[in-house]
Image: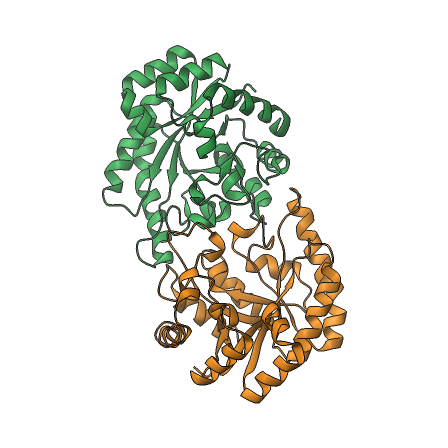
Chain colours: A orange, B green
Amino acid sequence: MSRLSLNQWTTRPLSVTEAVDACVRHEIPSIGLWRDHVAAHGLSATAALVRSAGLRVSSLCRGGFFNRPGWLDDNRRAIEEAAALEAACLVLVPGGLEGKDLAGAREQVATALATLVPYASEQGVWLAVEPMHPMYCADRGVISTLGQALDVAPPEVGVVVDSFHVWWDPDVLPQIARAGSRIASFQLSDFLDPLPADVLLGRAMMGDGVISFGPLVAAVEAAGYTGDVEVEIFNADVWAADPDEVLVTMKSRFSTLVR
Amino acid sequence: MSRLSLNQWTTRPLSVTEAVDACVRHEIPSIGLWRDHVAAHGLSATAALVRSAGLRVSSLCRGGFFNRPGWLDDNRRAIEEAAALEAACLVLVPGGLEGKDLAGAREQVATALATLVPYASEQGVWLAVEPMHPMYCADRGVISTLGQALDVAPPEVGVVVDSFHVWWDPDVLPQIARAGSRIASFQLSDFLDPLPADVLLGRAMMGDGVISFGPLVAAVEAAGYTGDVEVEIFNADVWAADPDEVLVTMKSRFSTLVR
């Protein structure tokens, strides 16, 4: 429980102040922040708030979307924000397809990551590319497996292991072992069956979907990861629920299913 | 065009008689039949009808669902039906999860395939296991990549290469080469972006989604596949359209995007 982190989108309706207060109230020692929430509160004010609350920042979500105009400037700003927040890493969502050139889009991710490494290094920020479930390949992330993320990213760039994105992958356990010290973030949510109409919201609280967390958790531990473990759930029912109840459930499920 | 096949679910509202007539009318030399349509028309009557129409049967869809009670008897019947229809192969949809034991479900597929091989061989039927898009891993098919299908299935069992299921896979081209003479069926449809509310219906006519067909077609050809190429589309708009228009579009797209 000393490594549990609340990813801010799990309690998306809460402001930065409310989410930080909720972490303190529920003795959750770490938070994964989102750039839009941070911007609404102010970057310096957020950095001061989390520090005074004694919270770690397990990640800043998110840079990436290398297929969008202005991606370079936007990612440089994201790196600066991650540095100001002393986030353990900056999560990068690769972005989907423009047109139908999947191979080209994947090359563009490799190029963009290599382009960003020097500035991230200068700012002391660990970039973490997130392989995404293949159902998002067209619209959100052309990097579809952990193995591919490790192949595409320069060695200075870490990877995000998100249970929702990788649970189906027949090669995931050996690839987690291969990732080793490149695991920059470990995120948890469950996979709903059936999926909702908007597949972006196909995540659920651990235990409410089909994922067996034990093997993934054991593999990430065995790979040497000692960072925080974020719970990141995009789910309309979770967002509509009482945030205090969500956090109570989250801690309970974490203690029974993860540790 | 001499290898084009109409998978019967592309024109799902049509009976066997209507679908066979449509193939003849549009000079489509091959058809992929579905068991429920065949049962409605009668097995022997269907076999006689397609033979008298001069059509090849590129596949019978489908056996599998090895997680369901009665799977063994059902698959033995499917093998007998494929034999009676002289289908080029029997497509096997692996089935999803019962509970959360993904590794166990995958072992069950391997066991089931090995169990079915002797009877299929006796009946002269080529079994073809279909790796399915990972968004169907929970509810429909726990075999998620072509590479995994080749690993799990005994060498006597072929594989289905379906563009919709495999297009996102960073390893698909080498795995098609590896599959070689084990490619028992090549099926085409496009991947919609955004997906519809029911992701089972996320397929589209070639050209209406995000897939580049050229590399897949070239790889399947290079692997030595000389069988029919089925167009299999699950799409509510396609089902609601005039079937003659669907087939005209299908031939046109096939000639521009595939050959």
Residue A157 in the image: state x and y as whole percent.
66, 68
Q: Is A32 placed left or right of B241 in the picture?
A: right
Q: Is residue B42 left or right of residue B177?
A: left
Q: Is residue B145 above or below residue B63?
A: below
Residue B82 visible in the snapshot: yes
Q: Residue at x 29, y 34 (%)?
A: B119
Please state which of residues B8 and A244 is positioned toward the viewer in this rendering.
A244
User: Does the image show residue B232?
Assistant: no
Q: Position of residue B222 (x, y in %)?
A: 61, 34
Q: Residue at x 34, y 74 (%)?
A: A256
Residue at the spot x=57%, y=20% of the render? B1
* Residue at figure coordinates x 54%, y 79% from the top left: A17
Tell me where residue A71 sits by quadrant: bottom right
Q: Is residue B118 above or below residue A200?
A: above
Q: Quadrant of residue B16?
A: top left
Mark count:
0
Image quarter of the C terminus of chain A:
bottom left
Quarter of the image with the N terminus of chain A is bottom left
Closer to the camera in the image, B9 or B94: B9
**Rendering coords of residue B81 (x, y %):** 30, 27
Locate residue B34: give its quadrant.
top left
Image spot of residue B104 (x, y percent): 34, 56
